[in-house]
Amino acid sequence: MGGPVGCVAAVTYGCNSRCVMCDIWKKDADVARELAPDEYRWLPRSLKSINVSGGEPFLRDDLPEIVAVMSETCASARIVISTNGLLPERIEAAVARMIETSSRGSDPVAVRVSVDGIGEAHDRMRGIPGAYEKAMETVSRLQRRLVPDLGLAATLTKDNIGEITKVKKKADELGIRFIMSAAHSSPIFFGEHEVERPYSKTSVAEVLELMQEHLRSWRPYDWARAYYLRGVVEYIRGRPRRLPCRAGQDFFFLDPWGDVYPCNIGGTKMGNVRESGFENMQRKTTCAVRESVASCDVQCWMVCTVAPPMSKRPLKPLAWMLGAKFLGLDTRVDK
């Protein structure tokens, strides 16, 4: 069915945040080893979505050049940059450069600003006093720059239950998009954060409230978000994921130094882009990757790892969306 359609590309492990649910800021950034912009020409042309992540990607002075290479190499890919929003002026300037030099007109990238609560609640989650005000300033600056695909991204943990719906309301007030995920652990990326994972009935109720809100919409995009949120509920409750995992086939994770993994949770390392192309890596490691994916018990459920299989195999998600929207099927869970 062709090559991979999704990629999470961490372009740096440098980070200016101190998030309670992520240890990337504790890593040795080792910026001297980071891939240069031209090295991203290695990316498979089959990609339809690239999540540019970090660390904090806007700490790289050459991020506009990286995005330009990605846009040229993967002409059909939607490029989404995830940022903590702590550098409003720098972020605005970088996005302005992307727009000015883009072959895609005024819409070269989407930007998601991480906001995990309102005011001090967000500051506690990010470990930075004033983080919320800076994130909101970043959103305001990008709105003035007429960035059309702008949104807030929240991470639900045991410590900010009740805040996620407030962030959704703020996004609605601003007229921008909203997405959420639940805290995950990862030996190669986030670190071990099982203690931050939400398990309570209250957290389930909050996600279900958001799911129902999406289902009240008449936009199919929102129905797809509702399906994703239904899967978040299963993840919180420790249930099997709603779609088979095809990490290393439909999508992959690329670290700042060129190492490729099936996903950002972990698995068998597939290779390094400085030594081999993706097709060669995939061919050489197919059996090992499939074995490691099959034995993985994390049951992760994040947008970056769910959207690719949803787009390649849409019948099951579509059937749920129609049943949930028009018949109310599978929209409740036992408490």
Image (cartoon, helix red, strand yellow):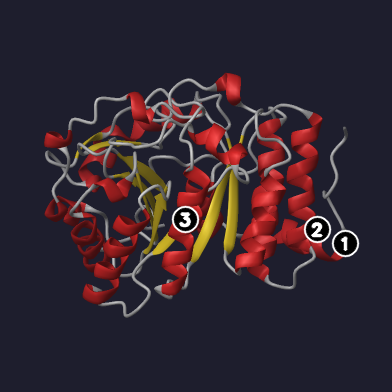
Which residue occupies 54% across, 47% down? 115
Q: CA distance from mark 2 to mark 1?
A: 6 Å
Q: Which residue is mark 3?
A: 112
Q: Which residue is mark 1?
A: 327
Task: Tell me if 172 is positioned left or right of 202 in this view.
Answer: left
> Which residue is at the front of the view, 39 or 149?
149
Residues tagged 1 and 3 counted as in contact (Cβ below 8 A): no
Label 1 crowding class (10 Å Cα cut-off): few <14, some 14-19, many 20+?
few
Callout 1: helix, strand or loop? helix
* Residue drawn where x is 52% and y is 53% of the image: 307
Cα separation between marks 1 and 3: 33 Å
Quadrant (top left/top right/bottom left/bottom right) for the N terminus: bottom left
Is mark 2 in CB contact (under 8 Å) with mark 1? yes
Of tags 3 and 2, the one toward the viewer is 3
Specify whether 200 is left or right of 38: right
Q: Residue at x 36, y 58 (%)?
A: 2
Q: Quadrant of the C terminus?
A: top right
318 w.r.t. 157: above or below: below
| Amino acid at pointer 3 | Arg
Answer above or below: position of 320 versus 14.
below
Q: Mark 2 Cα within 10 Å, few/some/many (few <14, many 20+)?
A: some
| Residue 315 seen in the figure | no
Please tell me which of labels 1 and 3 falls first in the chain. Answer: 3
The residue indicated by pointer 2 is: 324
Residue drawn at the location 35% of the way across and 50% of the way down: 87
Tell which of 5 and 122 is nearer to you.
Answer: 122
Specify the amino acid type for callout 2: Ala
Tell which circle, 3 or 2, labels the residue nearer the N-terminal end. 3
SS category of the residue bearing label 3: strand
* Res. 125 mark: none
